[in-house]
């Protein structure tokens, strides 16, 4: 296999990449997030690269953390001015 990009892999190779990466494709082990395996289905089908899926997933948490930090900073500034 040449790489992980859709253009370099077959559907079967992409399925294997996801299975090996997750370790438990059914995602029903203790501590596994429900639906984690389904998150990569677009990659397996050849519609979206792994990188794009991961970036979209992580962006939700990054934005959320930034908003929390901004709220804390604003609250701190408001208290300090009083």
Image (cartoon, rainbow, N blue to C red):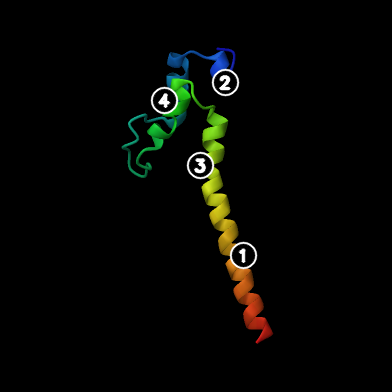
Circle 4 is placed at which residue position? 19
Q: Hey, which quadrant is residue 27 in on the image?
A: top left
Characterize the local packing of mark 1: few (<14), some (14-19) or many (20 or more) Cα atoms within 10 angstroms. few
Q: Hey, which quadrant is residue 81 in on the image?
A: bottom right
Distance between the Cα atoms at labels 3 and 2? 18 Å
SS assignment at label 2:
loop
Q: Residue at left 57%, top 51%?
A: 62
Mark 4 and mark 2 in contact? Answer it, CB < 8 Å: no
The numbered disc on residue 57 is 3
Answer with mark 4 or mark 2, whichever residue precedes in sequence.
2
Answer with mark 1 or mark 2, whichever residue precedes in sequence.
2
In the image, residue 15 lies at what x, y percent? 42, 20
Distance between the Cα atoms at labels 3 and 4? 18 Å
SS assignment at label 3:
helix
Picture layout, residue 14 above or below residue 21: above
Distance between the Cα atoms at labels 4 and 2? 16 Å
In the image, residue 13 lies at what x, y percent? 47, 15
Mark 3 and mark 1 in contact? Answer it, CB < 8 Å: no
SS assignment at label 4:
helix
Answer with mark 1 or mark 4, whichever residue precedes in sequence.
4
Nearer to us in this view, 33 or 8: 8
SS assignment at label 1:
helix
Q: Hey, which quadrant is residue 80 in on the image?
A: bottom right
Circle 2 is placed at which residue position? 5
The numbered disc on residue 70 is 1
């Amino acid at each position: 296999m040449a790489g992980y990009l859709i253009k370099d892999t077959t559907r079967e190779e992409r399925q294997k990449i996801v299975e090996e990466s997750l370790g438990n494709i059914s995602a029903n082990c203790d501590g596994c997030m429900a639906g984690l395996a389904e998150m990569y289905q677009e990659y397996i089908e050849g519609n979206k690269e792994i990188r794009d899926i991961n970036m979209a997933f992580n962006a939700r948490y990054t934005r959320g953390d930034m908003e929390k930090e901004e709220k804390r900073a604003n609250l701190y500034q408001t208290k300090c001015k009083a």
